[in-house]
Amino acid sequence: MTQQPRLGHNNPPGPNPSDTLAGIETTPDFTRFRQRNDVFTRAFWDDRVRSKHTDAFFASYRVDARPRKGEGFQPKDFALRNASWLISDIVSNRGGDSGRREGFQAPIQADTPVASQKVEIDDPARMAVEIKRIARFFGADLCGITDYDERWIYATQVDTRDFSEAPVELPEGMTSVIVLGHQMDLPLVQTYPSALAGAATGREYSHEAAIVMQLAAYIRNLGYQAVGSMNDTGLVIPYAIKAGLGEYARNQLVITPEFGPRLRFSKIFTNMPLAHDVPRPLGVKAVCDICTRCADACPVKALPFGPPSDAVANQSAITGVVKWTSDAEKCFSFWAKQGSDCAICLRVCPFNRDFGTWRNRLWLKLALSPLRRLALWLDDRSGRAKRLKPRDWWAG
């Protein structure tokens, strides 16, 4: 795989014409993000983030998890959470001592070569439809396609041997990004914050690892480059928005009309000729402008109030993008102290609903209309955001 030396290359060409439709606004201070500054990576090398709590947090994802007082943090809760991560862990750990943690600090290595015979594609729109069909066949819940945009590629990735910076590894000539959405289990999400709820996250990381590898292998078998990616290589949220999958929200998540914020995303970088989707602004921002339920519910007040801005709390946020930005250090400190991930902001989000039911589809239509305040009033009185007790989840 050809390595592109990206060290120090922070300011690529100007904004894409679709930025306005996607609601993406950059400033002259825009600087591409260095993955070493991700708060999870900083927990290994930065004493401002690392503590006895962070060491225990990462250790709890192995078999030596230590239960603590509180419902949802008992041995079987940690056992289910950790088991849900198994496939993802196998993929990310197969690099051994090479400094590559695939899917998190490095792209997923290809298990199959690019076929020597390239299948000619004379209709990129038709091929895009086929790719989406195959994505669904392998298990993806959503699939959108957008253009390769250098701005959202990390300036550098991380060598996990010493957490130094390393070049991002992508073949030359990438033209498209296929973004896949993976729905999290709604009842498990309702038990946040708990170790039990972490199984909803881990299950989808394991699912997406398999799905992204299979879809990438399909593309390579047709004679085109395809690099599978999860949290590595670049920021997936801008790509998901530009691929028409949803809109950015105050809680730092992508709100989709199918599943609300209850998704994990993966991506594939490819040079296959594919038609690109366009952003679909439905009106989520107008709701977030008047809704602060996620910020109100955050135990450590890591989420912002007020309008979007380019202000950042610390180095774990990208510079020069006007948006709602969380304080990642505060957020992760809570994760570490409780011993598992927290997604209270996801649980309480008014869009966190099962849109397979007609009642919730009707609510969505109301929320995305000028009657959005009425929709929020109805949501407050529905009891929908109430935490499900873990013992009730186990009781079935």
Image (tube, rainbow, N blue to C red):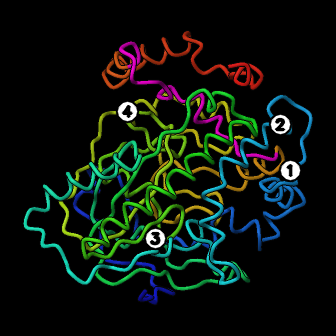
Residue located beneath label 3 in the image:
29
Q: What label does residue 65 carry, if any?
A: 1
Q: Are marks 3 and 2 in contact (CB under 8 Å)?
A: no
Q: What label does residue 345 carry, if any?
A: none
Q: Nearer the viewer, residue 303 or 240?
A: 240
**SS label for mark 4:** loop
Residue at 46% x, 90% y is 5
Residue 176 falls within the magenta-colored stretch: no
| Spot occupied by residue 150 in the image (x, y as percentages of width and height) | 36, 73
Residue located beneath label 2 in the image:
73
Residue located beneath label 4 in the image:
258
- Position of 183 with respect to 149 (left or right) is right
Task: Name the amino acid, label 1.
Answer: Ala
| Spot occupied by residue 107 in the image (x, y as percentages of width and height) | 50, 72
> Is most of the magenta stretch helix, strand or loop?
loop
Q: Earlier in the sequence, mark 3 or mark 2?
A: 3
**SS label for mark 3:** strand
Residue 348 falls within the magenta-colored stretch: yes
Find the residue positioned furthest to the left: 122
Residue at 61% x, 78% y is 100
Residue 385: quadrant of the picture: top right
Cα distance, mark 2 to mark 1?
A: 10 Å
| Mark 3 residue crowding within 10 angstroms, few (<14) / some (14–19) / many (20+) | few
- Position of 167 with respect to 258 (left or right) is right
